[in-house]
Amino acid sequence: MEKSKQTEESLKLFIILSRAHRALNDVVNNYIATFKLNPTEFAVLELLYHKGDQPLQQIGGKILLASGSITYVVDKLEQKGLLARRACPNDRRVTHAQITEKGKQLIEEIFPSHQEQINEIASVLSDEEKSHVTELLKKLGLHAKDILNKK
């Protein structure tokens, strides 16, 4: 394939991927907003619910958020009574975020519909297509990461 055609196809892929990502997020974020949560707050609660207590310093990396924003999000969730800070018994420098009972109840209310909504969005694809798209996007993401790491 000639260079300009290859570049054109790459740009087209980027635009389509960006638009699809935005559309998916818009659907999911609109649903999450009905529970008076923003996407980041939901991501923190979902992480704590499924993975247990987490050191504050590691939450950002797990939900793809800048570490400076974590304190703000944790503060908001703590004010809502959805999580609590707990000192690490082994290392006083480390503070863990822990989901509260109220937070667990909220996630248990939200998550089944959230999961079903994502399934509904993806239902346009067969299982084979989902697997193929997953493989291709993973390949694309890992390559982009490699490029970034080389700089």
Image (spheres, rainbow, N blue to C red):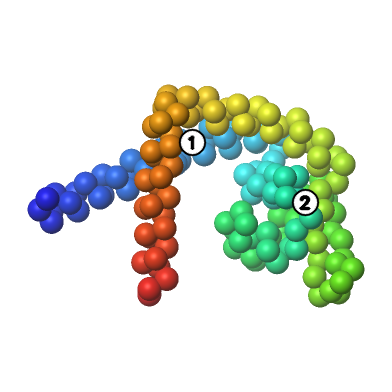
- On the image, numbered disc 2 is attached to which residue? 52
Could you say where residue 17 lies in the image, as x and y percent from the top left? 37, 43
Could you say where residue 2 lies in the image, as x and y percent from the top left? 10, 53
What is the three-letter code of the residue carrying label 2?
Gly
Q: Is residue 41 visible?
A: no
Residue at position x 62%, y 57% from top?
62
Q: Residue furthest right?
A: 89
Q: Residue furthest left?
A: 2
Could you say where residue 88 lies in the image, as x and y percent from the top left? 85, 67
**95 up-or-down from 45: above or below:** below
Quadrant where the C terminus is found in the figure: bottom left
**33 up-or-down from 80: above or below:** above
Q: Residues within 10 Å of mark 1 (few under 14, many from 20)?
A: some
Camera-side residue of 143 and 22: 143
Task: Give the Cα distance between marks 2 and 1.
Answer: 27 Å
Could you say where residue 83 lies in the image, as x and y percent from the top left? 82, 50
What is the three-letter code of the residue carrying label 1?
Leu
Q: Residues within 10 Å of mark 2 (few under 14, many from 20)?
A: few
Q: Quadrant of residue 142 in the image?
A: bottom left
Disc 2 is placed on an element classified as loop
Q: Is residue 135 rendered to the left or right of residue 66?
A: left
Pointers 2 and 1 in contact (C-beta within 8 Å): no
**143 up-or-down from 77: above or below:** below
Residue at position x 42%, y 26% from top?
126
Disc 1 is placed on an element classified as helix
- On the image, numbered disc 1 is attached to which residue? 24
